[in-house]
Amino acid sequence: MAIRGQTLFTIQTLSGWDHIAAVLSGVYPSTVVVPLIIIYMMLCCFAVIGLITSVISDSFMASQQKEQKNQEIGKALRYENVTRHLEEWFFQYGRSLPGCIGRDELEKALSEPQVSSLLLSMERPAKKTEILKLYDRINKEPSFSGRVQAGHMAEAVVTLSSEAKAIGLFDVKHKILGVRNEVIQKAEVSAKDSASQRKELKEIHELARSSQALVKEVQKDVATVRDDVTVMKAQIGKVLVKLEEHSKSQEQDRQDRNRAMAELNDKVNALVTQSAVVPAMSGKVDAIASQIAAQSGLGGKLDALAVQISTQTVVSAKVEALLGQVSAQLVSLNSDKGSDEKWHLKELEAQADTKASEPAAEPESPMLEGFRNPCGDFRMAPGFCTGRLDGCLVSYCYLVEGLSCFTGFHIGLYDVYMVCREI
């Protein structure tokens, strides 16, 4: 720093200017160099004088600003002291609400001599009417209505007693306080609303979760119902097929019943036509009944015949053997058609004659006499063989009738007759 100061002093004062002037005179004319050096030295002197003056003025301004700051600090301390004392007095008189003061209470407080001395100590003492107007203006605000705090009122009175521009600042502060109170109220309301909204959001989340669970259950139920529906469709298809088959079977049964009813109607009609013949047959039945009544004397003959049958067991055995031979001959007659048929029949008739001649010693029963025709041959019982049959069938039927009448056995005669009919 010393070297720099020495260099600056050398430049400004041109220390050793004669040597510099001698060097410059060797290059430029001396009439030019000497005036320039003098002008330069004058400029440097003015610069040094200005520098000294600026330093002196700067120190003076700094001291003045410091004094103003001290005055402002003292004023602020005095205002703060006055405000604190006024607030204490207002707190003492504010009994309606703790921390607040009413208009009547403010008038009583302003009537105190200590309060009046505090107001007079201010630069611009505030009047009582001005203070009451200020209270009314503050009380009109919705955020301060009925709740004007003692601290705010003391600060307003001190601000009112200060310079004119300070009251504007109080108005701004007053408005800011009102806005702050409104903001606080709105914040409380918004906090309540946000709390209720959070509760509603929680409820909505719970409802969403429950609805998701219900949706999942519904999806499961829908899936099961879909499966059940497919199963039911398959079952319904089977039932429809069975119903169609049942309807077809019912239709077939109905057709069969209709056919059967038609046949039954035909039979009924036939029976109706036959019923017209019944009156004609009733006469024949009456005639048969009269004949049966006329033949009531046959009971004794039948008893005698039963006695003869019991004594002719040997003959019955032979007749049964003969019937077996006859059945065999009938089978052979069925296969052999032609001239041998008559020969076999004649042989059978001869055998029948020989068998019939064996019990000739015994007298014939009256029952057999009743069955003999005028030619001396045995005839068949009614309803079996008639004279309308021809050939071997007639001869064979007569042969069998004679044997059965001779032995007194009619068992198996109808069967033999049916075999004859088939032949």
Image (cartoon, rainbow, N blue to C red):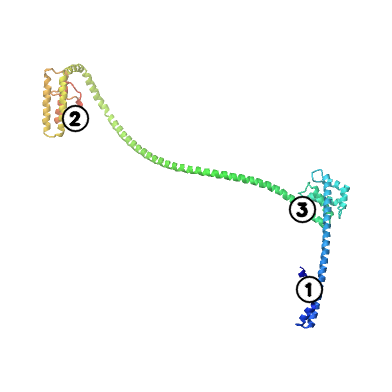
Instruction: Kindly report which numbered mark, 1 or 3, lies closer to the viewer in this rendering.
Output: 1
Q: Is residue 80 visible?
A: yes
Compared with residue 231, is residue 49 higher up or lower down, i.e. above or below? Answer: below
Instruction: Kindly report which numbered mark, 2 or 3, lies closer to the viewer in this rendering.
Output: 3
Which one is nearer the viewer's eye here, 269 or 327? 327
Regarding mark 2 in the picture, which secondary structure is present there?
A: helix
Q: Residue at x 10, y 30 (%)?
A: 343
The percent position of residue 170, horizontal first and vertical second, equals 80, 54
Mark drawn on residue 311: none
Compared with residue 11, is residue 80 higher up or lower down, i.e. above or below? Answer: above
Q: Are marks 1 and 3 in contact (CB under 8 Å)?
A: no
Q: Amino acid at mark 1?
A: Thr
Earlier sequence position, callout 2 versus callout 3? 3
Residue ID for mark 3? 175
Q: Quadrant of the C terminus?
A: top left
Compared with residue 318, is residue 239 higher up or lower down, i.e. above or below? Answer: below
Regarding mark 3 in the picture, which secondary structure is present there?
A: helix
Which one is nearer the viewer's eye here, 367 or 83? 83
The percent position of residue 90, horizontal first and vertical second, equals 83, 47
Which one is nearer the viewer's eye here, 421 or 123? 123
Which one is nearer the viewer's eye here, 328 or 175? 175
Which of the 4 image quadrants contains residue 322? top left
Is residue 313 left or right of 93 when viewed as pictured?
A: left
Residue ID for mark 2? 419
Residue ID for mark 1? 10
Classed neighbour count for the residue bearing mark 3: other residues with Cα under 10 Å, few (<14), some (14–19), many (≥20): some
The percent position of residue 379, horizontal first and vertical second, equals 16, 24
Earlier sequence position, callout 1 versus callout 2? 1
Which of the 4 image quadrants contains residue 345? top left
Q: Amino acid at mark 2?
A: Val
